[in-house]
Amino acid sequence: MFNKILIANRGEIACRVIKTARKMGIETVAIYSDADRQALHVKMADQAIHVGPAPANQSYIVIDKVMQAVTQSGAQAVHPGYGFLSENARFAQALEQAGIAFVGPPVGAIEKMGDKITSKKIAQEAGVNTVPGYMGLINDAEDAVRIANDVGYPVMIKASAGGGGKGMRIAWNDDEAREGFQSSKNEAANSFGDDRIFIEKFITQPRHIEIQVLCDSHGNGIYLGERECSIQRRNQKVVEEAPSPFLDQATRQAMGEQSVALAKAVGYASAGTVEFIVDGDRNFYFLEMNTRLQVEHPVTELITGVDLVEQMIRVAAGAPLSISQDDVTLTGWAIENRLYAEDPYRNFLPSIGRLTRYRPPAETTTYTPGTAAGDVGDIVVRNDTGVFEGGEISMFYDPMIAKLCTWAPTRDAAIEAMRVALDSFEVEGIGHNLPFLAAVMDHPKFVSGEMTTAFIEEEFPDGFDGVNLPESELRRIAACCAAMHRVAEIRRTQVSGRMDNHARRVGNSWVVTLQGCEFALKLTADPQGTTVEFEDGENIRVASDWRPGHTVARLATDDAPLVLKVDKITQGFRIRSRGADLTVKVRRPRQAELAALMPEKLPPDTSKFLLCPMPGLVVKVDVEVGQTVEAGQALCTIEAMKMENILRAEKKAVIHELRASAGDSLAVDDVILTFET
Ligand code: ADP
Ligand code: ADP
Ligand code: MG
């Protein structure tokens, strides 16, 4: 076994690999860029080597610099994580030449699977189902239209070198085929320096289901069940789970066996993933093979009990697999939510800045998967992260902050555990998608397991602007807020020094308003909790250990757990829970009467301004003063976090003044241009 390995990556995946290496008694070496001097993976590793400036193409993915670090450190092996150099055959080759082990598959397998056209041909020869389509290259837009007609609409136009959801378009007719061909080609040329395009059938009602495989260099190969990854935004995964609620055992086995056959056909050795698209009738078709550790590998670890990183390292050291297909059992259910620094209220634009608060839910490992079935009621919470409170989310890298996973014996229990974990997760200082994830976890279609890759597009067609909770939930929250407010008031009168009976002075009648609803409540407190009575006679029993100053309240209403994020405001609280962001006012009846008479304060009108939604660089401004723009028309392009974001007009308007131009660096809410009124 190795004594020392270098991890050629950053963020959560570098931290995750370090954990297993440490468990195996292997020393670890981190690499880092200027932006990552204080990063968690640097702190966790035994040794850390600087590899260059912040942009990845000047540090983490410069093969020479990484190789230099490898030599300098004396590491015997390199784990590449995902992204970066993980699927770079030249890097694997450089390591091979230097006599360093690559914790990944052989160079040949990376090359063959790195290209979508080549890999599809190999898959076909290995007896794997592939998506019907045209296997050749497409030369021009008219060619694309002709082939699309042969394949039959709808079609998927794809870049052979594509990855990360880039270089891909659906076309439903000739015009879209022409346009899709051109934009896929451009995107592929820009992102991958390779503009080869092919066309295949677009599978309708598609689910993305993938198989985890594990092979050694002695000819052994096994599969570790599947992951369902259908919840995607713009072809990027957001929520994953294992097993899939859609597969039966026969389909699982067929997919697993085809995946292992494909892996063996390319002499695969290491962990890898074969991605399939599955239609409504459970026909499955090969999409691509990812020759690396996958982002969402924890859900597989949670249901199989296999540490995939440990297996990868063992295989790279030449050991045979320590488990056979018969040893693989799938126990319970695991769900992963990807927490992204993307602001759901601003069309998921990337958000950067300092994490003024970062408190993940406590990790629990009461159950060791694979060793026992686990009693019903057991849950596991796992949070893979590369950040810490006070740290900075920079514009240079992937916006993923953490991967929150829950495991439970059943799918419903795993979902419920995830809801509670999300409600307990505190992140402040940057925009993030926690509320959106909470909304997905509560969505009936997700809960029923009947989702396709179109889920987010279909269920959130106008984006996401927060959750409106049903009245039953509002009542629970109102009752809790009244009980908490009473506690806060008692504390306040104590602090103000009055020594008489505080509880009595605080009073028992309260009016709670939230999300446009008003409830008049009567409270009866005893040492175990508070009984809250509504005007219509409903009673809710509230128990909690919340104290003024706590930012998370763990309560129970009639014994059902409820977790609220709590910020004190005048006469009440700002409450965040289940994807909703509520201003909850708790007033005495007389105060409530007066409040009702107050004119409503309106937020400032910013509709005349186009504000910059995130810190970034103006790439171009598409409009001129005096120009009339239609709703949806592009106004300006801002680059942030390696992504170009096009800002569009929300309605028809006339441009009044331009305040920014190409090359300007802008902060959040800087004015880019103004509209005439
Ligand atoms: P990438 O390399 O970018 O991950 P994939 O080929 O894996 O590209 O496709 C990414 C996603 O696009 C899939 O998860 C699926 O949602 C969708 N997709 C790809 N090909 C098809 C297809 N032929 N029909 C329907 N959806 C597809
Ligand atoms: P998945 O593993 O879920 O299929 P992808 O294939 O889209 O996801 O990519 C894996 C991960 O690597 C993603 O989180 C993506 O953002 C990241 N990634 C992809 N390309 C790069 C790159 N060039 N540099 C850094 N990270 C990358
Ligand atoms: Mg893919």
Image: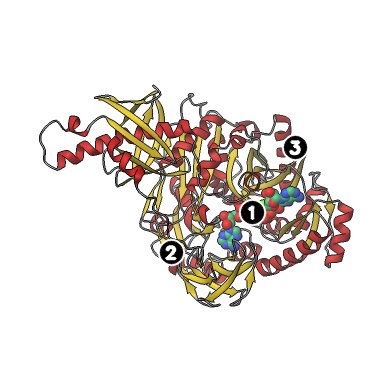
Q: Is residue 19 left or right of residue 126?
A: left
Q: Is residue 532 above or below residue 518?
A: above
Q: Is residue 306 visible?
A: no
| Callout 3 secondary element | loop
What is the secondary structure assignment of the residue under circle 2? helix
Answer with mark 3 or mark 2, whichever residue precedes in sequence: 2
State the CA–CA distance, disc 3 to disc 2: 45 Å
Q: How many marks?
A: 3
Q: Residue at x 64, y 54 (%)?
A: 234
Q: Residue 190 appears at what percent x and percent y? A: 67, 69
Q: Which mark is residue 375?
A: none
Tag 3 near tag 2, CB within 8 Å: no
Q: Is mark 1 within 8 Å of ligand 1?
A: no
Residue 12 position (above or below residue 606)? above
Residue located beneath label 2 in the image: 36
Q: Which disc number belongs to residue 234? A: 1
**Residue 230, position in %: x, y?**
65, 43
Please rate how many residues cluster around mark 3, counting C-alpha atoms within 10 Å: few if below 14, some from 14 to 19, many from 20: few
Q: Is residue 577 visible?
A: yes
The front one of 444 and 382 is 444
In whole angstroms, how far apart are the C-alphas of marks 1 and 3?
A: 21 Å
The spot of residue 652 in percent (x, y) is 62, 64
Front residue (pair 326, 645):
645
